[in-house]
Image (cartoon, grey):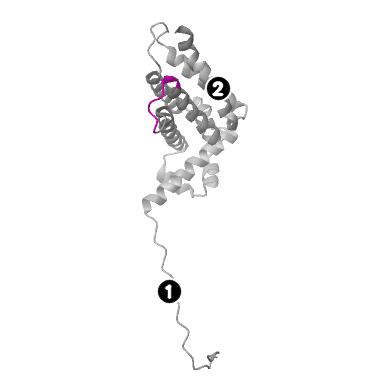
Amino acid sequence: MPPSGKGGTGEQTAKRPAASARPALPREFIALHKQRRIMDALAELTAEQGYEATKISDIVKRAGVARKTLYDNFEGKEEVFLAAFDSARDELMRRVEEGADGGDDADGGWQDRLEGGLAAFLGFVAEQPTVARMCMIEALSATPATTKRYEDAVDAFVELTRKALPDDDRLPGTIAETLVGGVIWIVYQQLRRGEAERAEDLLPELSEFMTAPYLTSA
């Protein structure tokens, strides 16, 4: 048996290599991560207590950052809101476009494209209820700038919907605005009731609502 113990004559215990230091994260990544936390905190707080009642002190406490960090990245509460809104709008637009395209299947008819985009929209609302409430309820009355952002976003989705719909001279030129407005109103009511997580249950009803004018006029 090989000798053991401190006074043994056996081989010396090999020294463990020093643990390598964890590489530092890029400063840009850290800054973006903090910005994301601040925007997420504002979305949560406005969903809970409204934009007006949400203070800078509430935001930095929820985000776990210093007040200086917020002001290093944003001019104030309104700019945080607008940045959060823009981020949500861009993500939602991407999802809706992908849903309408049908992923790898680009051969679907207009009804499939419409339903795919609508399903993506409702899925986003169900997955991110606080963000959806911020964008579809609080943005309407928070500040004039947020109201303008909301209106511009609705216009963008109207144009996206118009491209997905078939041409039909028998229907009014404002049909896309009517359909998008109706969908938004129904989802708005769902959010007001605190039932955002069930938004996807609306898919059959809203799909029928959006396709019916074209099917009945055929």
Count of number-bearing discs: 2
Residue 105 part of the magenta segment? yes
SS for dot 2: helix
Kindly indicate whether the residue at mark 2 contacts the one at mark 1 (C-beta within 8 angstroms).
no
In the picture, the disc for residue 204 is: 2
User: In this orientation, which residue lies closer to the viewer: 154 or 105?
Assistant: 105
Give the mark nearer the N terminus: 1 vs 2. 1
Residue located beneath label 1 in the image = 18
Identity of the residue drawn at 53% across and 27% down: 137
x and y, in percent, of residue 218 in the image:
44, 8
x and y, in percent, of residue 48 in the image:
59, 35
Name the quadrant containing residue 95: top left
Q: Amino acid at mark 1?
A: Ala
In the picture, the disc for residue 146 is: none
From this viewpoint, is residue 54 visible?
Answer: no
Identity of the residue drawn at 41% across and 44% down: 73
